[in-house]
Amino acid sequence: MTKNEKEVKKKVQLTLNGLKTGMVIKDLHGEDVEITENLVEQMKAFEKDTKKSAIWRNRITGNFLLYKWTKENPEEKKIKEVIEEELEEAIEEEVKDEENMLLDCIADYKVEYNVKTVKTDSKKFKAFFEKWKKEN
């Protein structure tokens, strides 16, 4: 080896085939996880279902942890989905209300200033909109 050459260390990438029962590897959060036969079977099922790897950079992936959690806690997943749906609906309604409010303000602006088009990013419209919101 010459002076300018560096010794390259090769990292061995863990795969499901390289896992053995009793091994301890880190998960996404850096916590130690002991490998069991059940865990290996879950990883194989995950890879088969999702076509994604359960191990990346010698760590258990977050996608696998989520998959495992949802399989172990199906009732909590349903609750989470219901909450997310309700939140999305509330956000959609709020956006519609804001859009309708803006359209009403634009209509009032057109009448007040006798214009056909409105530039909503102009200072004049923004000031009108703030005043209009306080009044309504």
Image (cartoon, rainbow, N blue to C red):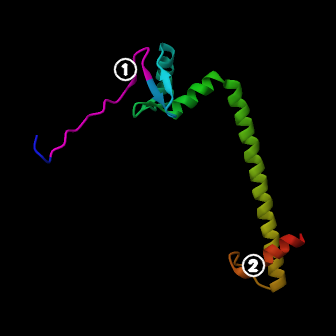
Q: Residue 17 lies in magenta, yes or no? A: yes
At 74% from the left and 45% from the top, the residue drawn is 87
Across and down, in percent, residue 117 comes to: 72, 80
At 75% from the left and 78% from the top, the residue drawn is 125
Q: Amino acid at mark 2?
A: Phe
Q: Nearer the viewer, residue 56 or 82?
A: 56
Give residue 81's quadrant in the image: top right
Q: Residue 98 lies in magenta, yes or no? A: no
Mark 2 vs mark 1, CA separation in Å: 65 Å
At 81% from the left and 66% from the top, the residue drawn is 101
Q: Which residues are magenta?
A: 5-24
Q: Specify the label residue 127 is tagged with.
A: none
Across and down, in percent, residue 84 comes to: 71, 41
Q: Specify the label residue 17 is tagged with.
A: 1
Q: Is residue 99 above or below residue 93?
A: below
Residue beneath disc 2 = 125
Q: Indicate left or right for 66 with 127 as reference.
A: left
Q: Is residue 48 above or below residue 98?
A: above
Across and down, in percent, residue 70 comes to: 62, 27
Q: Earlier in the sequence, mark 2 or mark 1?
A: 1
Q: Indicate left or right for 71 with 80 as reference.
A: left
